[in-house]
Image (cartoon, rainbow, N blue to C red):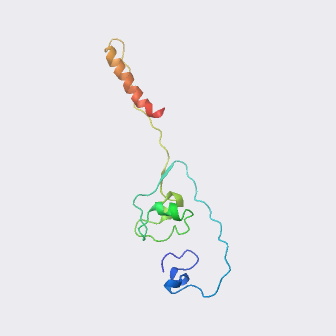
Amino acid sequence: NCCEAGSGTANQACCICGGGISEPVAPTTPAPVTPAPVTSGTCTNDPSFIDSFGDDCSWYEENDPTCSIGNCCEAGSGTANQACCICGGGITGPVAPVTPPPVTSPTPGSGSLQDAIDLINEALEILEPLA
């Protein structure tokens, strides 16, 4: 009786569960699915999300990328629609700019040539990831 998503439950639609139909039915065209909204910044799947079948967001990415059952199967950590980026949920946040710490430059006569070289090398290490 879980996971009704507009077409009945497994107990109503599945022969092995006592439901199903005994006559052929003309196929229906599924309604178009609106893709999940895209937000600026980054999105990370909630690592604590597990549905009642033991699946995490990777299952929805591989098996239900339209998240047709994204509101199903809540097991204490929310639904896929709340926890998974592909379903419009997840953990989002703006991309924060990386600001390197200020580099102090030596004042003339206050240190050795090696001190100056060491400071330049430190500055290069800080700036390298930004290049």
- The residue at the point 50 percent across, 59 percent down is 89
Residue 102 visible: no
- The residue at the point 51 percent across, 87 percent down is 18
- Where residue 54 sits: x, y (%)? 41, 68
Callout count: 0
Residue 90 in the image: above or below residue 17: above
Residue 98 visible: yes
- Where residue 1 sits: x, y (%)? 48, 81
Q: Is residue 109 left or right of residue 49?
A: left
- Where residue 88 sits: x, y (%)? 53, 59
Q: Is residue 14 left or right of residue 120?
A: right
Please identify the residue farthest to the top as the structure is shown. 109
- Where residue 123 sits: x, y (%)? 40, 26
Q: Is residue 16 left or right of residue 21?
A: left
- The residue at the point 68 percent across, 80 percent down is 26
Residue 57 in the image: above or below residue 108: below
In front of the other: 29 or 72: 29
